Image (cartoon, rainbow, N blue to C red):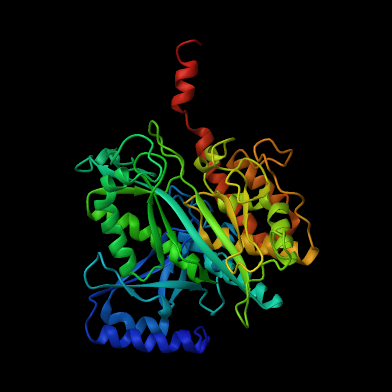
Amino acid sequence: MDFIADNDLWSSEQRAAANDVLKACGRKHADTLRLSFADQHGLLRGKTLTADECASVFRSGCTMTSTLLLKDTSHKTVFPVFMAGGGLGESEFQGAADLIMVPDPTTFRMLPWAPRTAWMLCDLYFRDGRPVPLSTRYQYRQALDRLRRIDADYIAGLEVEFHVFKRIDGDICAEAAGQPGRPPEVALLNTGYQYLTEQRFDQIEPVLEIVRRDVEALGLPLRSIEVEFGPSQCEFTFKPGVGMDPADDMVLFRSAVKQICHRHGYHATFMCRPKMPNVISSGWHLHQSLVNRTDGTNLFMPTEEGSHLSPLGMNYLGGLMKHARASAVFSTPTINGYKRYRSYSLAPDRVNWGRDNRGVMLRVLGSPGDPASRIENRIGEPVANPYLYMGSQILAGLNGIELAIDPGPPADSPYETDATLLPKSLREAVAALRDDPFVRDAFGQKFVDYFSDIKMAEVARYEETVTDWEHREYFSDF
């Protein structure tokens, strides 16, 4: 059976790329082939095959267990898969049945840090050829397709903060296993606060150079490497990309950084706020604009002097604000991430916008004649699933355009403005998602229920855990 051809799952570009990949594998440039897909959390999962299986995979795809889409961040399966409908009302998930990974040959890469290892990103399908609607890459593609209605493409530039530590735990003992496992013991690479100081950059340059070399070898559009404010904290920024590319780049970048660092004795984490003294929260700032599909004109660029954005751009901005609370669960999907929303911290705590102001949620950078006119959303945490983060931006922005939503005046004092507060917890963010009729409809009620259930499973486990704070607060005095 030629599953891919029979169901017409590839574009002409993908078919041409597949021929090039087969030639590369035929020349024995690779011994193994990793097939990966981004799960609901934006983590890469998949299988490793011998390179000789490439031709077979390009006909039939590769099976994978459907429960991989049903797990929370501890890798526990949230839904009762052995009940009728797999706990989702979907027979395709019942009994932990298989789904099919179909590789996207245009994403083919050789992994610089893993000798003779090829890699491809996959899309997910049911056995009858239908796309799996719970796939977040599919959800993002649906959002991109909606832009075609206004003859527009989505442009995104990434600023990603994260921490790199030296591992000091040596061998991993059996007691460290678990669900989740015990985190590694680490040491700082530098001390003190350090924003953009060359001396501190030079202290951690050796490991950043290792990462830079392999990230560029992957073909990712790296723009800059910087030391951030906190100890052992850095930031990588990327040139703007179109459509699917920046989301694909983000999932590959995060996975690559963790793998590269681990092989050299370091631990990289994109966790927003690690539990370490004096460590500073990390964010993911998403720069975005729309361009005309025909001539590439920036649709956010204003034409009138004194304007911040075009009328279309201002309406897009209004949509982002209207649905900011409902979209927070996609930009900040962890319990930990909400500890970053603090006043006077260079992170937002309320729904507002301003011109070139780093205290607002939505920082507007635009002027007449500036082809880089854009909106920077400063709400995200680095672990966010890029397909959901970016998809939620597109859908909210399009709603703003369709309804001609006015974002109101800019905030000159962002932490003192009378504005709607962002959710203070993951539980509150899930409730905001469920309470927004537009976002529920845009993503589909079934997907929203599915994603909400996974997030609430994490909340339930967190609320059942006795924390250090509780023990210190109550154990002695009561």
Quick check: can you spot residue 1? no
Image position of 198 (left or right of 328): left
Relative depth, front residue between 15 and 109: 109
**Depicted 146 relative to depicted 313: above or below:** below
Quick check: can you spot residue 146? yes
Relative depth, front residue between 109 and 301: 301
Residue located farthest toward the left when viewing the structure as drawn = 171
Residue located farthest toward the front when viewing the structure as drawn = 305
Q: Which residue is drawn at 54% across and 49% down?
A: 333
Q: Quadrant of the N terminus?
A: bottom left
Image position of 417 (left or right of 382): right
From the top left corner, tell me how far across and down residue 312 is, in percent. Answer: 73, 66
**Depicted 190 relative to depicted 439: above or below:** above
Relative depth, front residue between 56 and 316: 316
Q: Residue at x 39, y 46 (%)?
A: 196
The picture quadrant where one finds residue 443 is bottom right
The picture quadrant where one finds residue 315 is bottom right
**Depicted 140 relative to depicted 353: above or below:** below
From the top left corner, tell me how far across and down residue 26 is, in percent. Answer: 25, 87
From the top left corner, tell me how far across and down residue 225 is, in percent. Answer: 37, 55
From the top left corner, tell me how far across and down residue 246 is, in percent. Answer: 49, 67
Q: Which residue is drawn at 78% across and 59% down?
A: 405
Counting the numbered discs, the total is 0
